[in-house]
Image (tube, grey):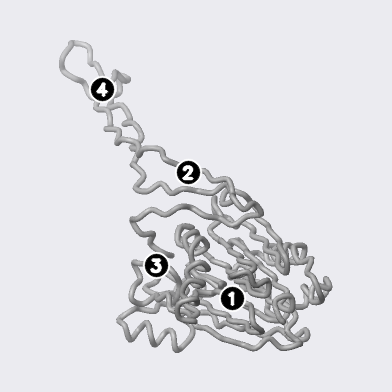
Amino acid sequence: MTCSVSLSPGFSPSKSSSQPHYTSLSSSPEMRTLTHSPPKLQQPSSELVKGSDDAVSSGVTSRPTSWKRKRPSKLVLPMRYVFGLSRAAERRFVEAEGDGYAVYCMRGRKEAMEDRYSAKLTIHGHPKQAMFGIYDGHGGAKAAEYAAANLIKNVIEQVDKMGDQDIVEAVKLGNGELVVSNAGDCRAVISRGGVAVALTSDHRPSREDEKSRVMALGGLVECTRGGVLRINGSLAVSRGIGDECLKPWVIAEPETKVLAIEPDFEFLILASDGLWDKVSNQEAVDVVRAKGAGIGRLAALAVCKELAGLSFSRGSRDDISVMVVAVGQFCG
């Protein structure tokens, strides 16, 4: 899973179970857990039935009697894992908005949405401190669910202890500072007076430093169909949470930037690659500014929907998650 608290990652889920989580408008989202027992294997039937005279004679009677083997029943394989799913994961769209931010998630071609997000306002009673995250799951949603449920909480606990920001694309706003961290290909883009500035750099094998790091550890970087570089022919990102089968090449260590919030910082866009693969940084900023969302209290949900719709109209079939944050609301 990749993230840009913003997150990315195919990952291999661990064998331990975790409580499913998906942020929604409700503080206690309704959850549903699938707990069906795995079905038993059905043995193919060996029953013989009479057929036509065209079959080989059995030699038992004077009149040839033909037999043919009955088609065996369908072989049903048991499911190895059954994960809990929130009802939000089954929806086509998920949206939320709060003081200073809005988020919109659109499910792609898969049966269940694998993207997740999280938002934490008023940290330790300080209304100017907040954290936001986008988590792009792949190969399933379990890692993204776990990160959405635990990452911000864990970061706050560690900051309290050490003053450290160990996040996988996470954003903390407060005390006049903007801290941005990512692992994967979710991206954080700031509007500075209408100019788009990427605050994160996508972790992909196409980056020479990432390619060299992977190969130095014995990993293989292959050019696959469409000219996409993938690690061991599998994953197109080089950092992210999960991906146990691709360790030690795919790491969860984030890259982090700390910036002083300047007067020309208008808004922050956090989004999964479902947006950025089809919409450029500057185009996304222009869409938000055209709606007047760079001034004062944001009415940004409509803007998030418009950006997701724009990417979809250009052929994106991936999950698309877009979050817009009014930076000025958390300064001062």
Q: Alpha-carbon distance for marks 1 and 2?
A: 30 Å
Kind of residue at badge 1: Val
Per the rendering, the mark at residue 171 is 1
| Total numbered labels | 4
- Of badges 3 and 1, nearer the viewer stands 1
Per the rendering, the mark at residue 33 is 2
- Of badges 1 and 2, nearer the viewer stands 1
In the image, residue 31 above or below residue 107:
above
- The earlier-in-sequence mark between 1 and 4 is 4
Which image quadrant is residue 304 in?
bottom right
Kind of residue at badge 3: Asp
Query: Helix, strand or loop at disc 4?
Result: strand
Q: Tell me, yes or no, if residue 283 can be seen here.
A: no
Kind of residue at badge 2: Thr
Residue shown at 62%/49% (left/top)?
91
Query: Helix, strand or loop at disc 3?
Result: loop
Q: Nearer the viewer, residue 292 or 264?
A: 264
Q: Alpha-carbon distance for marks 4 and 3?
A: 48 Å
Q: Nearer the viewer, residue 268 or 172?
A: 172
Q: Alpha-carbon distance for marks 1 and 4?
A: 67 Å
Residue ranking furthest to the top:
62
Q: Is residue 247 shown left or right of residue 48?
A: right
